[in-house]
C-alpha cells in the first residue's frame, strides 16, 4: 500500500498561489484548514496528494528542483493533434490565471510540452 503524502511548497502569498493551483488542477481548498500563513488544497475525489503552501520570508532565487507536470491528455496512446489542442487550451487558461509561457518543446513535428511559470515564478510543464 502506498504512503499518503503532501507536496509542501514555499510561497510569498499562500492563498493566492493555492487558488491558482486549485484552478489549474481541479483541486479545492482543504476543508478545515485555516491558517493566515498557509493554505492547503486537495483533490476533491481524494485520489491525488494534498498540496500545502506556507508563507516564507525569502523570495524565489533559483530554478525549482521539483515541479508539477499537468498532463491534460491523460495516458498514451494519443491522437497527437487532439493532444496538442488540449495542451494549448490549458496553457491559454493558465495564462488567464496569471501564469506565463517560457517555451514550447517539440520533436520538430509535434508539441511535447509547454514550460510555464506560475504567478510566483515557479516552473511547471503542461503536457
Image (tube, rainbow, N blue to C red):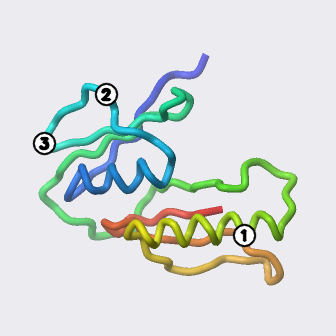
Residue shown at 46% from the left, 72% from the top: 95
Residue shown at 24% from the left, 50% from the top: 15
Residue 18 tag number = none
Separation of marks 2 and 1 at Cα, in angstroms: 34 Å
Residue shown at 56% from the left, 64% from the top: 125
Q: Quadrant of the N terminus?
A: top right
x%, y% of residue 36? 13, 42
Q: Which residue is mark 3?
A: 36
- In the image, is residue 103 above or below residue 36? below
Q: Earlier in the sequence, mark 2 or mark 1?
A: 2
Q: Earlier in the sequence, mark 1 or mark 3?
A: 3
> Which residue lies most toward the bottom here?
108
- In the image, is residue 38 above or below residue 79? above
Please rate how many residues cluster around mark 2, counting C-alpha atoms within 10 Å: few if below 14, some from 14 to 19, many from 20: few
In front: 104, or 1? 104
x%, y% of residue 25? 50, 49
Lateral position of residue 68 relative to residue 108, left or right: left
Lateral position of residue 101 relative to residue 30, left or right: right
Say what secondary structure mark 3 lies in: loop
Separation of marks 1 and 3 at Cα, in angstroms: 38 Å
Say what secondary structure mark 1 lies in: helix
Please rate how many residues cluster around mark 1, counting C-alpha atoms within 10 Å: few if below 14, some from 14 to 19, many from 20: some
Q: Quadrant of residue 117?
A: bottom left
The label nearer to you, 1 versus 3, is 1
Say what secondary structure mark 2 lies in: loop
Lateral position of residue 86 relative to residue 15, left or right: right
- In the image, is residue 27 above or below residue 65? above
Residue 31 tag number = 2
Residue 85 tag number = 1
The label nearer to you, 3 versus 2, is 2
Separation of marks 3 and 2 at Cα, in angstroms: 15 Å
Amino acid at each position: 500500500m502506498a504512503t499518503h503524502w503532501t507536496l509542501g511548497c514555499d510561497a510569498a502569498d499562500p492563498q493566492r498561489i493555492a487558488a491558482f493551483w486549485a484552478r489549474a488542477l481541479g483541486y479545492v481548498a482543504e476543508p478545515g484548514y485555516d491558517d493566515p500563513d498557509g493554505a492547503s488544497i486537495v483533490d476533491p475525489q481524494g485520489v491525488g496528494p494534498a498540496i500545502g503552501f506556507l508563507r516564507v520570508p525569502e523570495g524565489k532565487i533559483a530554478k525549482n528542483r521539483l515541479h508539477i507536470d499537468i498532463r491534460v491528455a491523460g495516458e498514451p496512446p494519443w491522437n497527437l493533434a487532439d493532444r496538442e489542442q488540449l495542451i494549448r487550451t490549458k496553457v491559454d487558461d493558465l495564462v488567464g490565471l496569471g501564469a506565463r509561457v517560457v517555451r514550447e518543446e517539440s520533436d520538430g513535428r509535434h508539441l511535447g510540452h509547454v514550460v510555464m511559470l506560475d504567478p510566483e515564478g515557479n516552473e511547471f510543464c503542461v503536457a
